[in-house]
Image (spheres, rainbow, N blue to C red):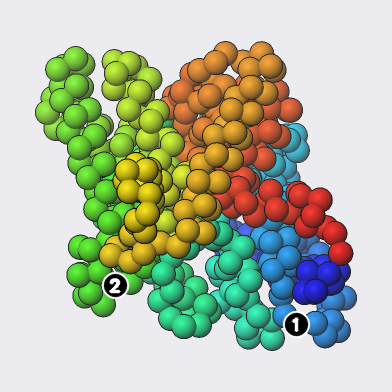
Amino acid sequence: MPNSRLINIIIVLRVLSFLLLVEGLFMLSGIGFAIYYNEPMWPLLLSSIITLFIGLVIWLTTRKNDKRNIGKREGYLIVALTWVVISLFGTLPFIFSGTITNFTDAFFETISGFTTTGASIITNIEVIPKNILYWRAMTQWIGGMGIIVLTVAILPFLGIGGLQLMIAEMPGITPDKLHPRITETAKRFWAIYVIFTIAEMLLLWAGEMDFFNSVCHSFSTMATGGFSTKNISIAAFNPYTQYIIILFMIFAGTNFTLHYFALHRRFDKIRSNEEFKIYMWIILILTFFIAGGLFIYKGLSPENSFRDSLFTVVSILTTTGFVTADYSLWPSFLWMFIFALMFIGGSAGSTGGGVKIIRHLLLIKNSVLEMKRSIHPQAIIKVKYNGKSVSQQIIFNVMAFFLIYILIFSFGTLILSLLGYDFNTSIGATIASLGNIGPGIGNVGPDDNYAFFLPLAKWLLSFLMLLGRLELFTVLIVLSPAFWKR
């Protein structure tokens, strides 16, 4: 039996060691800002040395392993452990610099970055050294497209197959392959990701932002992460900057396969994509509805109402989490729409988190067809997406995902309530963490942060971020007893 073999721990360690080497090199990239702003560079340098040293030691001690293929179980284990391991080492710059003094808070901030959640425990962001803020933004940029996808593009050069990593990284609904080889797909995704990041950085730099802020905010935008260098987030910047960020949040929340088609002028693929059309309709309809409410009930100017509405809708739908307005102060019937958006998420194959629009679409389609099947029990009626039939297995996967998602959301809310937090804060923090959004409702609204939570609550929320980033199944499979049986 293929599943009867032991998990190849050596290959797992070898891949993780390579990821640590990559992380250590990314840490070094922030030293330039430390030099430019005359800040201590040793926290990043020491963190990088430790990370590179441990990664190199593990890499060298596992180099004689002759089992090159990564099986399905190794793939799941590598993906689940990757986000924990890189977050553990990612805490070092925060701790060494004194930015965050205890490990729980440092881990929370770091895993919030790598999972692109954007929930923060830092109360005064603007006093933090620039090079540490850069690393904070970098954690989101790395996590945005997924360090696993980067690894898939590189591992074949090391003689290690990477297909199982891609399967584990994006279980269930997956983006269309752009190339028969999964490696080429990963390269194309990263190329698009880098191009958009540079384009946004240049456009922001052309406005009021300096180079440092344009880099950090471009990293956070394309990752749909939401870490800002300002205490009041994007509200600190002018309308030009806000509109640029809105545009690139929309890009980041779109299936990257469609970007590939756009670059090759295959616009028919975009026009026929059902998920993209619903994605844009949600943005348009809710933006104008909420803008009308802000204009009537808050007395804002038409442009200000439109901009705040559009920014908030796009930010929450794509799970970016940037803010320009405190939506908790809006009339309740308006911010309830924002809360509902937290359960939707971006497109499949995007850097956004959440349930994903395609899952909602398939669930609705299947529910409608189920009524038709009840009327015509002998008829064979299949769910179709983009003109193609969807297998029953995918429908079952979507239904299971929804059920587990709601159960985990309910469980997280219950635990936080038992720890003494009010209901709004409990549901707000749970969905904001599980959906990788950042701001929620209650005491974790747009103008608040997560510093007040007890250590146990922070570990729970960190776990929810990991579950949400890996779309539940990867982590739950690794935690199941059956996974570890020979």
Residue at image x 51%, y 26%? 428
Position above or below: 164 against 219: below
Tell me which label, 2 or 1, sits earlier in the chain: 1
Number of the label disc, if any, that sits on residue 356: none
Give percent across and percent down for residue 218: 40, 54
Q: Is residue 206 above or below residue 325?
A: below
**Pick the front one: 273 or 235:** 273
Q: Please, which residue is most extreme toward the left here?
A: 302
Q: In the image, what residue type sits under mark 1?
A: Arg
Residue shown at the point (83%, 69%) measured from the top left = 4
- Res. 255 visible in picture: no
Residue nearest the viewer, comparing 26 with 167: 167
Measuring 59% from the left and 33% from the top, which residue is drawn there?
Answer: 407
- For the C terminus, which image quadrant? bottom right
The amino acid type, in three-letter code, at marker 2 is Phe
The image position of residue 260, as x and y in percent, is: 33, 72
> Tag 1's secondary structure?
loop
- The residues tagged by marks 2 and 1 sit, at their Cα atoms, a distance apart of 34 Å
Looking at the image, how many numbered discs can be counted on the residues?
2
- Quadrant for residue 426, please give it: top right
* Relative image position of residue 21 (x, y in whole percent): 70, 68
Q: What residue did someone put label 1 on?
A: 68
User: SS class of the residue under badge 2?
Assistant: helix
Foreground of the two, 462 or 394: 394
Residue underneath mark 2: 261
In the rendered image, the vertical position of residue 326 relative to residue 221, given as above or below: above
Q: Quadrant of residue 96?
A: top right
Q: Residues within 10 Å of mark 1 (few under 14, many from 20)?
A: few
Q: Quadrant of residue 326?
A: top left
At x 63%, y 29%, the residue is 412
